Image (tube, grey):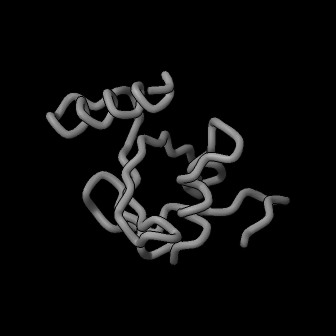
């Protein structure tokens, strides 16, 4: 299992047992092809009062899933909220 995937699973486990790591939140969004819910740790940042979720690794599947989903369909840390924004200059598909 790649390190990134192992690290994500550990962070998810810690979060679910009540030991969050830093500003990390859990993003849950439906997969764009299967529709199955997928959870990944993210660290939202606030820019001029607007929350963004920034991808750390280019080509991450969670970004593709999030862009394919409706912004109201995200579950962040067990509460539904429209947190995802497309960064200026980014392409939204």
Whether 56 is drawn above or below 92: the answer is: above
Residue positioned 41% across, 72% down in the render: 35
Residue positioned 54% across, 63% down in the render: 66
Q: Furthest residue to the right?
A: 89
**Quadrant location of the C terminus?**
bottom right
**Quadrant location of the N terminus?**
top left
Residue 50 figure quarter = bottom right
Q: Furthest residue to the left?
A: 17
Count of numbered circles in the view: 0
Tell whether 80 sits left or right of 67.
left
Q: Position of residue 31 (x, y in %)?
A: 46, 65
Residue positioned 62% across, 44% down in the render: 55
Q: Furthest residue to the front?
A: 1
Whether 18 is drawn above or below 66: the answer is: above
Q: Position of residue 30 (x, y in %)?
A: 42, 67
Q: Position of residue 63 (x, y in %)?
A: 60, 55
Residue positioned 40% across, 36% down in the render: 24
The answer to which of 91 and 51 lies nearer the viewer is 91
Q: Furthest residue to the top?
A: 3
Q: Position of residue 15 (x, y in %)?
A: 25, 36
């Amino acid at each position: 299992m790649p390190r990134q995937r192992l690290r994500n699973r550990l962070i998810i486990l810690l979060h679910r047992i009540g030991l969050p790591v830093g500003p990390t939140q859990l993003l849950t969004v439906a997969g764009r092809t299967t529709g199955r819910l997928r959870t990944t740790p993210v660290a939202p940042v606030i820019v001029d009062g607007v929350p963004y979720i920034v991808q750390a690794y280019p080509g991450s599947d969670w970004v593709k899933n999030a862009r394919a989903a409706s912004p109201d369909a995200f579950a962040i840390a067990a509460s539904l909220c429209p947190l995802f924004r497309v960064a200026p200059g980014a392409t939204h598909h």
